[in-house]
Image (cartoon, rainbow, N blue to C red):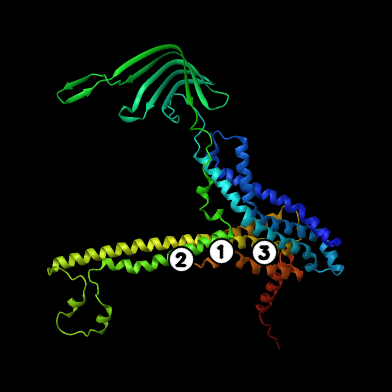
Amino acid sequence: MKKIDKLVLKSFFGPFFLTLAVVIFIFLMRLLMLYIEEFVSKDITLVTFGRLLYFFAVLTVPTALPLAVLLSSLMTFGNLGEFFELTAMKSAGISLTRALRPLLVLAVLFMGFSFWFNNNVAPWANLKAYSLLYDIKTAKAALNLKEGIFYNDLPGYSIKVDKKQGDSLTNLVIYKNSSSGIESGNREIILAKSGRMYTDPSRSYLVFELTNGNDYQEYNDGRSAVSYTGSGTVKTTQFMRNGFKHYKLVISLESFGLHRTDEQQFEYHPYMKTLTELTTIADSLKKDATRASLTVAGSSRNYYTYQFKDEAVVKDKKVTEGKWIDTVLARPLHTSNPVEVEQLALSQAQNMLSYVQSNILYLAEKEKSSYAYELESHHKFTQSVSVFIMFLIGAPLGAIIRKGGFGLPVLVSIIFFIVLYVLTLLGDKFAKDGAWPVVLGAWMANIVLLPVGLYLLRQARLDSRLFDKDAYLIAWNRLKARFGKDKQPLSVPVS
């Protein structure tokens, strides 16, 4: 490796790792802002939260890699141009293409790494991240009693306190709810003047230590009396009241906390599939859609009143006078009333219309499912190719701008990344809806940005002053001078 290659690579790797970390951090902050309500007031340990952030950081690498390559290559050649190192290279006979060669090889390696990551690591990270996120979203909020409001998240209990200071409670009302059989409802009520609430060391049980209260119970032991009234019978129950000075109520917290769901329930999503699995599923869905469309014609014959007995006879039959058509119909009408015939025809037409509409929706959903899997299989390639295209844009653009640091390069990089992101979303939408071929929708962003990268590379090789303000001022002054000269009045010589 020559010194020029070491110089360029050394200038590249520092900004690359820094920008990659910053971009991943930004995506993680976006995740937190999007699901902040799901994380608040839930008993999630730091280990679980750290695992969630780790999985999402891993799966954002393919998305962050193009932006990191774009920004770091732009900063690298922007710094080289700003400190006249590119000028020194060119004066020594080293072309821009030669200076780009080490990063060009590195961009190809990044492209291969991105494809491998998308095909092998990203499905695993998506499965782990979204299954864990689902479990966090479905977990119950941590126990939070509020003054004067019934708390009903504990299964089988409704609890209200008048005042709460830390773990000390005042004027408690606890309903024990029964949900079994005909005796369902609030069959037991506990009233206490004061109490204390805490969890056991294992955090598996919630304990209420109550003082100075009563326990009211209503139950049916099978020997209750039955009274007869004028409107029917009324079944009476036993009522019991127990006073206490100290009472300990233990409630299980099994319904709280995080309960892991079987990850196989999430494996159906395209994000959790490798390229081979995506191709196989997409082909199977296409075959199913084709097979279903072929059965529609045969099934639709059941909605017609008239059916030909022998189509060959009908083709050879000449239209003549008489009732010859009745001899070739399988199900002739059993009525000659015009009103009944019209009603029957209208009913058959409505049934046929409903059948056609339902089959159109069914086949459209089948095709959309195949489009989604096929689109994801193309994204395994498009995301890796976008890394190379972002390099083609960033490196020449840095050589043209000749500005390093996090100022102008960051602004330009964000603009191109937004263009890439928006074009990708538009292409995906049109492809999933079937408005565009899947190949065109998946590759639209790369198709649009590749000529931009090649054009910038050409301009950088020609030392173009594309972003030089003075060049545009000179061109504008020349344009004004030209039009001003054309507008000058002709001078007429005076004799």
373 to the left or right of 460: left
Q: Is residue 95 above or below residue 27?
A: below
The residue pinned by badge 3 equals 389
Q: Of the residues tagged 3 and 1, which is closer to the observer?
A: 1
Question: Callout 2: helix, strand or loop?
Answer: helix
Q: Which mark is residue 442?
A: 1
Q: Which numbered marker is on residue 322? A: none
Q: Look at mark 2 in the image and give the residue it sits on.
A: 287
Q: Earlier in the sequence, mark 1 or mark 2?
A: 2
Q: Quadrant of residue 378?
A: bottom right
Query: Which residue is at the far bottom?
Result: 495
In space, the residues marked 3 and 2 are separated at their CA atoms by 35 Å
Residue count near mark 3 (Cα–Cα under 10 Å), binned few <14, some 14–19, many ≥20: many
Mark 1 or 2: in front is 2
Q: Is residue 31 visible?
A: yes
In the rendering, at what x and y percent does residue 487 appear?
65, 77
As shown in the figure, which amino acid type bears the numbered disc 1?
Ala
